[in-house]
Image: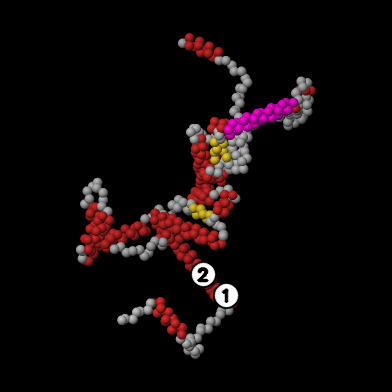
Amino acid sequence: MARKKAPAFERLLSIARKAGSLKRQTHQLRAKRAVVIKPTTAERLAKRQKLRERKVSYKAAIAEAHQKIQQLALEIHAKFKNFSQDRVVTDVFQSRRLKDSSKKVSRYAAFVSAQMKILNAETPEGQPRQKVNELSKRIADQWGKMTEEEKVAATEEGLTALCERREVQDTGTWHNADLSASHDTSLTVGRVKEELQRLNARTGDESVLFVTRGSLTRFHPAESYCSSDRAEGFLSTVLKTSGEDIALRMDAYMVLGVEGVARNHAKALLESKARVAALILQKLKQCAGNQDAKKMFYTNFEDHITRPYGIVIKNWPLKKFKNPSSIHSQADLSVLWNTFETGATHFYKMNKGEYQEWETKEVDARRKAEEALQALRDMRAEERSPLEPNDAAERPLPQRNQSPTAPVLPTSINVAPSEPSTPNFFTATVVTNAAGEAVVSTSRPRKRRSDAGIPRKKKAKKNAQAASEDRDA
Protein backbone atom coordinates (compact mmCIF):
# COMPACT_ATOMS: atom_id res chain seq x y z
CA MET A 1 0.00 0.00 0.00
CA ALA A 2 1.34 3.43 -0.94
CA ARG A 3 2.44 5.72 1.82
CA LYS A 4 0.12 8.66 2.43
CA LYS A 5 1.73 12.01 1.64
CA ALA A 6 1.87 14.53 4.48
CA PRO A 7 0.05 17.81 4.07
CA ALA A 8 1.97 20.80 2.82
CA PHE A 9 1.72 22.67 6.12
CA GLU A 10 3.23 19.77 8.06
CA ARG A 11 6.09 19.47 5.56
CA LEU A 12 6.90 23.16 5.91
CA LEU A 13 6.73 22.85 9.69
CA SER A 14 9.17 19.91 9.61
CA ILE A 15 11.62 21.87 7.44
CA ALA A 16 11.47 24.77 9.88
CA ARG A 17 12.19 22.48 12.80
CA LYS A 18 15.22 21.00 11.06
CA ALA A 19 16.54 24.45 10.19
CA GLY A 20 16.10 25.59 13.78
CA SER A 21 17.92 22.56 15.18
CA LEU A 22 21.15 23.33 13.28
CA LYS A 23 24.08 24.54 15.32
CA ARG A 24 25.16 28.12 15.03
CA GLN A 25 28.34 28.72 13.11
CA THR A 26 31.45 30.05 14.80
CA HIS A 27 32.28 33.71 14.56
CA GLN A 28 35.15 32.98 12.19
CA LEU A 29 32.75 31.56 9.57
CA ARG A 30 30.05 34.20 9.95
CA ALA A 31 29.73 37.06 7.47
CA LYS A 32 31.14 40.20 8.94
CA ARG A 33 28.83 43.17 9.30
CA ALA A 34 29.55 46.19 7.18
CA VAL A 35 31.08 49.02 9.11
CA VAL A 36 28.82 52.07 8.96
CA ILE A 37 30.53 55.37 9.46
CA LYS A 38 28.11 58.07 10.50
CA PRO A 39 28.59 61.32 8.63
CA THR A 40 29.64 64.36 10.55
CA THR A 41 27.56 67.51 10.87
CA ALA A 42 29.61 69.25 8.18
CA GLU A 43 29.10 66.32 5.80
CA ARG A 44 25.33 66.33 6.42
CA LEU A 45 25.17 70.07 5.79
CA ALA A 46 27.19 69.65 2.60
CA LYS A 47 24.81 66.89 1.44
CA ARG A 48 21.77 69.07 2.14
CA GLN A 49 23.38 71.95 0.30
CA LYS A 50 24.08 69.69 -2.65
CA LEU A 51 20.46 68.45 -2.71
CA ARG A 52 19.22 72.02 -2.44
CA GLU A 53 21.39 73.14 -5.32
CA ARG A 54 20.21 70.18 -7.37
CA LYS A 55 16.59 71.07 -6.65
CA VAL A 56 17.16 74.71 -7.61
CA SER A 57 18.91 73.69 -10.83
CA TYR A 58 16.07 71.28 -11.63
CA LYS A 59 13.51 74.05 -11.16
CA ALA A 60 15.62 76.35 -13.32
CA ALA A 61 15.70 73.69 -16.04
CA ILE A 62 11.90 73.30 -15.83
CA ALA A 63 11.49 77.08 -16.03
CA GLU A 64 13.78 77.19 -19.04
CA ALA A 65 11.73 74.44 -20.70
CA HIS A 66 8.53 76.42 -20.02
CA GLN A 67 10.15 79.50 -21.50
CA LYS A 68 11.06 77.55 -24.60
CA ILE A 69 7.51 76.26 -24.87
CA GLN A 70 6.21 79.82 -24.57
CA GLN A 71 8.58 80.89 -27.34
CA LEU A 72 7.46 78.00 -29.55
CA ALA A 73 3.84 78.83 -28.79
CA LEU A 74 4.48 82.41 -29.85
CA GLU A 75 5.92 81.16 -33.15
CA ILE A 76 2.92 78.88 -33.70
CA HIS A 77 0.60 81.78 -32.88
CA ALA A 78 2.37 83.92 -35.48
CA LYS A 79 1.77 81.16 -38.00
CA PHE A 80 -1.84 80.41 -36.98
CA LYS A 81 -3.47 83.75 -36.16
CA ASN A 82 -6.81 82.13 -35.31
CA PHE A 83 -5.47 80.62 -32.09
CA SER A 84 -4.12 82.68 -29.21
CA GLN A 85 -0.83 81.98 -27.49
CA ASP A 86 -2.59 80.73 -24.34
CA ARG A 87 -4.62 78.35 -26.48
CA VAL A 88 -1.49 76.93 -28.08
CA VAL A 89 0.18 76.47 -24.68
CA THR A 90 -2.93 74.69 -23.39
CA ASP A 91 -2.92 72.37 -26.38
CA VAL A 92 0.75 71.56 -25.83
CA PHE A 93 0.37 70.77 -22.13
CA GLN A 94 -2.91 68.88 -22.43
CA SER A 95 -1.66 66.74 -25.32
CA ARG A 96 0.79 65.12 -22.87
CA ARG A 97 -2.14 63.73 -20.89
CA LEU A 98 -3.33 61.65 -23.82
CA LYS A 99 -2.70 57.94 -23.63
CA ASP A 100 0.67 57.04 -25.06
CA SER A 101 0.23 53.26 -24.74
CA SER A 102 -3.04 52.89 -26.59
CA LYS A 103 -4.08 49.56 -28.05
CA LYS A 104 -2.83 48.92 -31.57
CA VAL A 105 -5.43 48.91 -34.32
CA SER A 106 -6.04 45.31 -35.38
CA ARG A 107 -6.65 44.10 -38.92
CA TYR A 108 -9.86 42.45 -37.81
CA ALA A 109 -11.23 45.84 -36.70
CA ALA A 110 -10.37 47.29 -40.12
CA PHE A 111 -12.06 44.30 -41.78
CA VAL A 112 -15.23 44.74 -39.68
CA SER A 113 -15.36 48.44 -40.54
CA ALA A 114 -15.00 47.73 -44.27
CA GLN A 115 -17.63 44.95 -44.23
CA MET A 116 -20.12 47.11 -42.35
CA LYS A 117 -19.79 49.82 -44.98
CA ILE A 118 -20.40 47.25 -47.76
CA LEU A 119 -23.40 45.64 -46.05
CA ASN A 120 -25.01 48.95 -45.11
CA ALA A 121 -24.50 50.20 -48.67
CA GLU A 122 -26.77 47.39 -49.81
CA THR A 123 -29.51 48.46 -47.36
CA PRO A 124 -32.44 50.17 -49.18
CA GLU A 125 -33.00 53.85 -48.52
CA GLY A 126 -35.37 54.49 -45.65
CA GLN A 127 -34.60 51.21 -43.90
CA PRO A 128 -32.67 51.16 -40.58
CA ARG A 129 -28.94 50.51 -40.88
CA GLN A 130 -27.60 47.19 -39.62
CA LYS A 131 -25.49 47.11 -36.48
CA VAL A 132 -22.21 45.37 -35.70
CA ASN A 133 -23.65 43.08 -33.03
CA GLU A 134 -26.19 41.76 -35.53
CA LEU A 135 -23.56 40.85 -38.16
CA SER A 136 -20.56 40.02 -35.98
CA LYS A 137 -20.98 36.24 -36.31
CA ARG A 138 -21.31 36.43 -40.07
CA ILE A 139 -18.22 38.66 -40.39
CA ALA A 140 -16.22 36.40 -38.03
CA ASP A 141 -17.02 33.32 -40.11
CA GLN A 142 -15.91 35.12 -43.27
CA TRP A 143 -12.69 36.29 -41.55
CA GLY A 144 -11.87 32.75 -40.39
CA LYS A 145 -12.05 31.32 -43.89
CA MET A 146 -9.51 33.82 -45.27
CA THR A 147 -5.76 33.18 -45.53
CA GLU A 148 -3.12 35.51 -44.09
CA GLU A 149 -2.33 37.00 -47.51
CA GLU A 150 -6.04 37.66 -48.16
CA LYS A 151 -6.42 39.30 -44.73
CA VAL A 152 -3.49 41.64 -45.35
CA ALA A 153 -4.73 42.56 -48.83
CA ALA A 154 -8.32 43.15 -47.61
CA THR A 155 -7.35 45.35 -44.65
CA GLU A 156 -4.38 47.38 -45.94
CA GLU A 157 -6.39 50.49 -46.86
CA GLY A 158 -8.84 50.14 -43.96
CA LEU A 159 -6.05 49.81 -41.41
CA THR A 160 -4.43 53.04 -42.57
CA ALA A 161 -7.78 54.84 -42.49
CA LEU A 162 -8.51 53.64 -38.94
CA CYS A 163 -5.08 54.78 -37.72
CA GLU A 164 -5.62 58.22 -39.22
CA ARG A 165 -9.10 58.43 -37.70
CA ARG A 166 -7.78 57.57 -34.24
CA GLU A 167 -5.00 60.16 -34.52
CA VAL A 168 -7.47 62.83 -35.57
CA GLN A 169 -9.79 61.84 -32.73
CA ASP A 170 -7.01 62.18 -30.15
CA THR A 171 -5.14 65.29 -31.25
CA GLY A 172 -6.74 66.67 -34.39
CA THR A 173 -9.90 68.31 -32.99
CA TRP A 174 -9.18 71.71 -31.47
CA HIS A 175 -11.99 71.48 -28.93
CA ASN A 176 -10.35 68.39 -27.43
CA ALA A 177 -7.82 70.50 -25.48
CA ASP A 178 -10.55 72.41 -23.63
CA LEU A 179 -12.50 69.23 -23.00
CA SER A 180 -9.37 67.51 -21.72
CA ALA A 181 -8.63 70.47 -19.44
CA SER A 182 -12.16 70.28 -18.02
CA HIS A 183 -11.74 66.58 -17.33
CA ASP A 184 -8.38 67.31 -15.73
CA THR A 185 -10.03 69.88 -13.45
CA SER A 186 -12.82 67.51 -12.43
CA LEU A 187 -10.44 64.67 -11.58
CA THR A 188 -7.95 66.90 -9.74
CA VAL A 189 -10.63 68.70 -7.72
CA GLY A 190 -12.11 65.36 -6.73
CA ARG A 191 -8.75 64.15 -5.45
CA VAL A 192 -8.15 67.42 -3.58
CA LYS A 193 -11.56 67.14 -1.88
CA GLU A 194 -10.76 63.60 -0.76
CA GLU A 195 -7.40 64.72 0.63
CA LEU A 196 -9.00 67.64 2.51
CA GLN A 197 -11.63 65.30 3.91
CA ARG A 198 -8.95 62.88 5.14
CA LEU A 199 -6.99 65.82 6.60
CA ASN A 200 -10.08 66.92 8.53
CA ALA A 201 -10.60 63.38 9.83
CA ARG A 202 -6.94 63.05 10.93
CA THR A 203 -6.23 66.48 12.41
CA GLY A 204 -9.57 68.27 12.71
CA ASP A 205 -8.36 71.17 10.54
CA GLU A 206 -11.11 72.97 8.63
CA SER A 207 -10.85 74.11 5.01
CA VAL A 208 -12.89 75.90 2.37
CA LEU A 209 -12.18 75.38 -1.33
CA PHE A 210 -13.37 77.36 -4.36
CA VAL A 211 -12.59 76.32 -7.94
CA THR A 212 -13.73 78.37 -10.92
CA ARG A 213 -12.89 78.45 -14.60
CA GLY A 214 -10.50 81.01 -16.04
CA SER A 215 -12.21 81.69 -19.38
CA LEU A 216 -15.41 81.10 -21.29
CA THR A 217 -13.84 78.23 -23.23
CA ARG A 218 -13.91 76.00 -20.13
CA PHE A 219 -16.98 73.89 -19.50
CA HIS A 220 -16.84 72.95 -15.83
CA PRO A 221 -19.10 74.86 -13.39
CA ALA A 222 -17.91 76.72 -10.31
CA GLU A 223 -17.42 74.45 -7.31
CA SER A 224 -17.26 75.07 -3.58
CA TYR A 225 -16.29 72.69 -0.79
CA CYS A 226 -16.51 72.99 2.99
CA SER A 227 -14.85 70.34 5.13
CA SER A 228 -17.64 70.38 7.76
CA ASP A 229 -20.76 72.17 8.94
CA ARG A 230 -18.60 74.51 11.02
CA ALA A 231 -16.97 75.90 7.89
CA GLU A 232 -20.39 76.42 6.30
CA GLY A 233 -21.56 78.13 9.48
CA PHE A 234 -18.57 80.48 9.31
CA LEU A 235 -19.55 81.56 5.79
CA SER A 236 -23.22 82.07 6.65
CA THR A 237 -22.71 83.71 10.06
CA VAL A 238 -19.59 85.83 9.62
CA LEU A 239 -19.57 86.58 5.89
CA LYS A 240 -23.38 86.53 5.54
CA THR A 241 -23.23 84.41 2.42
CA SER A 242 -22.84 80.83 1.24
CA GLY A 243 -20.10 78.91 -0.50
CA GLU A 244 -22.14 78.57 -3.68
CA ASP A 245 -22.66 82.35 -3.82
CA ILE A 246 -18.94 83.06 -3.40
CA ALA A 247 -18.08 80.49 -6.08
CA LEU A 248 -20.56 82.00 -8.54
CA ARG A 249 -19.32 85.54 -7.90
CA MET A 250 -15.70 84.45 -8.24
CA ASP A 251 -16.54 82.67 -11.50
CA ALA A 252 -18.22 85.82 -12.83
CA TYR A 253 -15.20 87.94 -11.86
CA MET A 254 -12.73 85.57 -13.52
CA VAL A 255 -14.73 85.53 -16.74
CA LEU A 256 -16.27 89.01 -16.99
CA GLY A 257 -14.57 91.13 -14.33
CA VAL A 258 -16.22 93.41 -11.77
CA GLU A 259 -19.24 94.10 -13.97
CA GLY A 260 -19.89 90.39 -14.25
CA VAL A 261 -19.74 89.98 -10.46
CA ALA A 262 -22.33 92.71 -9.90
CA ARG A 263 -24.56 91.38 -12.67
CA ASN A 264 -24.25 87.80 -11.51
CA HIS A 265 -24.89 88.69 -7.86
CA ALA A 266 -27.93 90.78 -8.74
CA LYS A 267 -29.27 87.98 -10.94
CA ALA A 268 -28.76 85.38 -8.23
CA LEU A 269 -30.41 87.66 -5.67
CA LEU A 270 -33.46 88.20 -7.90
CA GLU A 271 -33.74 84.47 -8.50
CA SER A 272 -33.58 83.79 -4.76
CA LYS A 273 -36.26 86.39 -4.07
CA ALA A 274 -38.58 84.90 -6.67
CA ARG A 275 -37.91 81.38 -5.43
CA VAL A 276 -38.65 82.27 -1.79
CA ALA A 277 -41.79 84.23 -2.70
CA ALA A 278 -43.09 81.30 -4.78
CA LEU A 279 -42.43 78.87 -1.90
CA ILE A 280 -44.27 81.08 0.61
CA LEU A 281 -47.27 81.42 -1.73
CA GLN A 282 -47.30 77.64 -2.25
CA LYS A 283 -47.31 77.05 1.54
CA LEU A 284 -50.11 79.61 1.95
CA LYS A 285 -52.29 77.86 -0.65
CA GLN A 286 -51.67 74.50 1.00
CA CYS A 287 -52.75 75.92 4.37
CA ALA A 288 -55.82 77.68 2.92
CA GLY A 289 -57.08 74.43 1.42
CA ASN A 290 -60.43 74.86 -0.32
CA GLN A 291 -60.32 78.63 0.17
CA ASP A 292 -58.79 80.28 -2.86
CA ALA A 293 -55.80 82.33 -1.66
CA LYS A 294 -54.46 83.74 -4.91
CA LYS A 295 -51.94 86.21 -3.52
CA MET A 296 -49.69 86.63 -0.51
CA PHE A 297 -49.89 90.00 1.27
CA TYR A 298 -47.11 91.23 3.54
CA THR A 299 -48.50 94.71 4.10
CA ASN A 300 -51.81 94.67 6.02
CA PHE A 301 -51.41 90.91 6.45
CA GLU A 302 -54.14 90.76 9.10
CA ASP A 303 -56.67 92.46 6.81
CA HIS A 304 -55.98 90.44 3.65
CA ILE A 305 -55.01 87.02 5.04
CA THR A 306 -55.90 86.60 8.72
CA ARG A 307 -59.37 88.13 8.66
CA PRO A 308 -60.75 86.38 5.52
CA TYR A 309 -58.95 83.02 5.93
CA GLY A 310 -58.11 82.82 9.65
CA ILE A 311 -54.41 82.13 8.92
CA VAL A 312 -51.41 83.30 10.93
CA ILE A 313 -47.64 82.72 10.59
CA LYS A 314 -45.62 81.02 13.29
CA ASN A 315 -41.82 81.03 13.86
CA TRP A 316 -40.96 83.85 11.43
CA PRO A 317 -37.10 83.75 11.44
CA LEU A 318 -36.31 87.40 10.62
CA LYS A 319 -36.65 90.47 12.82
CA LYS A 320 -39.15 92.16 10.49
CA PHE A 321 -42.06 90.72 8.59
CA LYS A 322 -41.70 91.95 5.04
CA ASN A 323 -41.84 90.91 1.41
CA PRO A 324 -38.87 88.85 0.14
CA SER A 325 -38.48 91.44 -2.61
CA SER A 326 -37.48 93.94 0.12
CA ILE A 327 -34.76 91.65 1.50
CA HIS A 328 -31.31 92.43 0.12
CA SER A 329 -29.25 89.79 1.93
CA GLN A 330 -28.63 86.39 0.38
CA ALA A 331 -28.14 84.90 3.85
CA ASP A 332 -31.57 86.12 5.05
CA LEU A 333 -33.19 84.70 1.92
CA SER A 334 -31.46 81.37 2.51
CA VAL A 335 -32.66 81.31 6.12
CA LEU A 336 -36.22 82.11 5.03
CA TRP A 337 -36.14 79.40 2.34
CA ASN A 338 -34.75 76.74 4.69
CA THR A 339 -37.22 77.47 7.50
CA PHE A 340 -40.25 77.28 5.18
CA GLU A 341 -38.85 74.25 3.35
CA THR A 342 -38.28 72.29 6.57
CA GLY A 343 -41.57 73.42 8.13
CA ALA A 344 -39.98 75.32 11.03
CA THR A 345 -41.77 78.43 9.79
CA HIS A 346 -45.33 77.65 8.70
CA PHE A 347 -48.82 79.00 8.23
CA TYR A 348 -51.39 78.02 10.86
CA LYS A 349 -55.14 78.05 10.32
CA MET A 350 -57.02 78.99 13.48
CA ASN A 351 -60.15 77.18 14.57
CA LYS A 352 -63.40 78.98 15.30
CA GLY A 353 -62.65 79.66 18.96
CA GLU A 354 -59.12 80.92 18.27
CA TYR A 355 -60.38 83.14 15.47
CA GLN A 356 -63.05 84.75 17.69
CA GLU A 357 -60.49 85.33 20.45
CA TRP A 358 -58.06 86.91 17.95
CA GLU A 359 -60.79 89.15 16.51
CA THR A 360 -61.80 90.34 19.99
CA LYS A 361 -58.20 91.15 20.90
CA GLU A 362 -57.72 92.97 17.60
CA VAL A 363 -60.82 95.15 18.10
CA ASP A 364 -59.72 96.03 21.63
CA ALA A 365 -56.19 96.83 20.48
CA ARG A 366 -57.45 99.10 17.69
CA ARG A 367 -59.83 100.88 20.07
CA LYS A 368 -57.05 101.49 22.58
CA ALA A 369 -54.74 102.76 19.83
CA GLU A 370 -57.41 105.20 18.60
CA GLU A 371 -58.09 106.41 22.17
CA ALA A 372 -54.39 106.98 22.77
CA LEU A 373 -54.11 108.86 19.49
CA GLN A 374 -57.11 111.07 20.32
CA ALA A 375 -55.73 111.80 23.79
CA LEU A 376 -52.42 112.84 22.22
CA ARG A 377 -54.22 115.17 19.82
CA ASP A 378 -56.24 116.76 22.66
CA MET A 379 -53.11 117.29 24.75
CA ARG A 380 -51.29 119.00 21.88
CA ALA A 381 -54.34 121.17 21.14
CA GLU A 382 -54.37 122.43 24.74
CA GLU A 383 -50.66 123.28 24.58
CA ARG A 384 -51.12 125.49 21.53
CA SER A 385 -51.40 129.32 22.15
CA PRO A 386 -53.47 131.28 19.59
CA LEU A 387 -51.93 134.23 17.79
CA GLU A 388 -53.07 137.57 19.23
CA PRO A 389 -54.33 140.13 16.64
CA ASN A 390 -52.06 143.01 17.78
CA ASP A 391 -48.88 140.92 17.63
CA ALA A 392 -48.52 141.46 13.92
CA ALA A 393 -48.72 145.26 14.28
CA GLU A 394 -46.23 145.33 17.14
CA ARG A 395 -43.73 143.19 15.23
CA PRO A 396 -40.51 145.27 14.71
CA LEU A 397 -39.45 145.86 11.13
CA PRO A 398 -35.93 144.80 10.13
CA GLN A 399 -33.31 147.54 9.75
CA ARG A 400 -32.03 148.46 6.26
CA ASN A 401 -28.47 147.53 7.02
CA GLN A 402 -29.48 144.29 8.68
CA SER A 403 -28.71 141.21 6.60
CA PRO A 404 -31.82 139.22 5.82
CA THR A 405 -30.41 135.97 7.03
CA ALA A 406 -33.57 134.48 8.56
CA PRO A 407 -37.06 135.78 9.39
CA VAL A 408 -37.42 137.03 12.97
CA LEU A 409 -40.42 135.49 14.74
CA PRO A 410 -42.02 137.16 17.76
CA THR A 411 -41.48 135.45 21.05
CA SER A 412 -45.21 135.14 21.67
CA ILE A 413 -45.71 132.75 18.76
CA ASN A 414 -45.23 129.08 19.56
CA VAL A 415 -44.81 126.99 16.47
CA ALA A 416 -46.90 123.90 17.07
CA PRO A 417 -45.64 120.57 15.91
CA SER A 418 -47.41 118.83 13.12
CA GLU A 419 -50.47 116.83 14.06
CA PRO A 420 -49.71 113.19 14.68
CA SER A 421 -50.81 110.97 11.89
CA THR A 422 -52.25 107.49 12.13
CA PRO A 423 -49.61 104.94 13.02
CA ASN A 424 -48.19 103.22 9.96
CA PHE A 425 -48.29 99.81 11.61
CA PHE A 426 -50.51 97.82 13.91
CA THR A 427 -49.14 95.22 16.27
CA ALA A 428 -51.19 92.04 16.18
CA THR A 429 -50.26 88.47 16.96
CA VAL A 430 -50.71 87.28 13.38
CA VAL A 431 -46.94 86.75 12.87
CA THR A 432 -44.84 85.24 15.66
CA ASN A 433 -41.18 84.26 15.97
CA ALA A 434 -39.67 81.07 17.38
CA ALA A 435 -40.09 82.37 20.96
CA GLY A 436 -43.81 82.99 20.42
CA GLU A 437 -43.37 86.77 20.50
CA ALA A 438 -45.26 88.95 18.06
CA VAL A 439 -43.40 90.26 15.01
CA VAL A 440 -44.41 93.73 13.89
CA SER A 441 -46.27 93.53 10.60
CA THR A 442 -46.54 96.67 8.52
CA SER A 443 -50.07 98.06 8.08
CA ARG A 444 -50.45 101.12 5.90
CA PRO A 445 -53.65 103.19 6.22
CA ARG A 446 -55.59 104.07 3.15
CA LYS A 447 -54.32 107.29 1.58
CA ARG A 448 -56.45 110.34 2.36
CA ARG A 449 -57.94 112.12 -0.62
CA SER A 450 -56.58 115.59 -1.34
CA ASP A 451 -60.12 117.04 -1.58
CA ALA A 452 -61.46 115.27 1.50
CA GLY A 453 -64.04 117.43 3.34
CA ILE A 454 -64.35 119.90 0.47
CA PRO A 455 -67.82 120.01 -1.15
CA ARG A 456 -67.62 119.08 -4.79
CA LYS A 457 -69.16 121.33 -7.43
CA LYS A 458 -72.09 120.02 -9.37
CA LYS A 459 -71.75 119.49 -13.07
CA ALA A 460 -75.04 121.26 -13.97
CA LYS A 461 -73.39 123.92 -16.12
CA LYS A 462 -71.46 121.38 -18.13
CA ASN A 463 -74.55 119.28 -18.64
CA ALA A 464 -76.60 122.30 -19.78
CA GLN A 465 -73.87 123.38 -22.19
CA ALA A 466 -73.69 119.90 -23.68
CA ALA A 467 -77.49 119.82 -24.11
CA SER A 468 -77.48 123.20 -25.91
CA GLU A 469 -74.76 122.01 -28.27
CA ASP A 470 -76.85 118.96 -29.11
CA ARG A 471 -79.85 121.19 -29.94
CA ASP A 472 -77.79 123.45 -32.19
CA ALA A 473 -76.49 120.40 -34.04
Residue 266 belongs to the span the image colors magenta: no
Question: Which residue is the site of mark 2?
Answer: 55
Position of residue 280 measured from the top left corner of the image (x, y, whole percent):
52, 39
Can I make out residue 178 in this image? yes
Q: Nearer the viewer, residue 214 or 272?
A: 272
Q: How is the image coloured?
A: secondary structure
Q: Nearer the viewer, residue 415 or 188?
A: 188
Residue name at image x 61 percent, y 26 percent: 448
Question: Which residue is the site of mark 1?
Answer: 45
Can I make out residue 318 in this image? no
Looking at the rendering, in which quadrant would you find the N terminus? Answer: bottom left
Residue name at image x 74 percent, y 26 percent: 382
Mark 1 element type: helix
Give the crowd class for mark 2: few <14, some 14-19, many >=20 residues within 10 Å.
few
Give the vertical position of 145 relative to 396 (above or below).
below
In the image: residue 451, left or right of residue 153? right
Position of residue 295 measured from the top left corner of the image (x, y, whole percent):
51, 34
Position of residue 243 measured from the top left corner of the image (x, y, whole percent):
53, 51
Residue lying at the far top in this picture: please name it.
Answer: 471
Residue name at image x 56 percent, y 48 percent: 241
Give the vertical position of 137 relative to 410 (above or below).
below
Q: Main secondary structure of the magenta part?
A: helix
Q: Amino acid at mark 1?
A: Leu
Please give the range of residues in magenta.
353-382
- First in residue order: circle 2 vs circle 1: 1
The total of numbered circles placed on residues is: 2
Residue name at image x 47 percent, y 87 percent: 23
In the image: residue 137, left or right of residue 308? left
Give the crowd class for mark 1: few <14, some 14-19, many >=20 residues within 10 Å.
few
Position of residue 443 measured from the top left corner of the image (x, y, whole percent):
60, 33
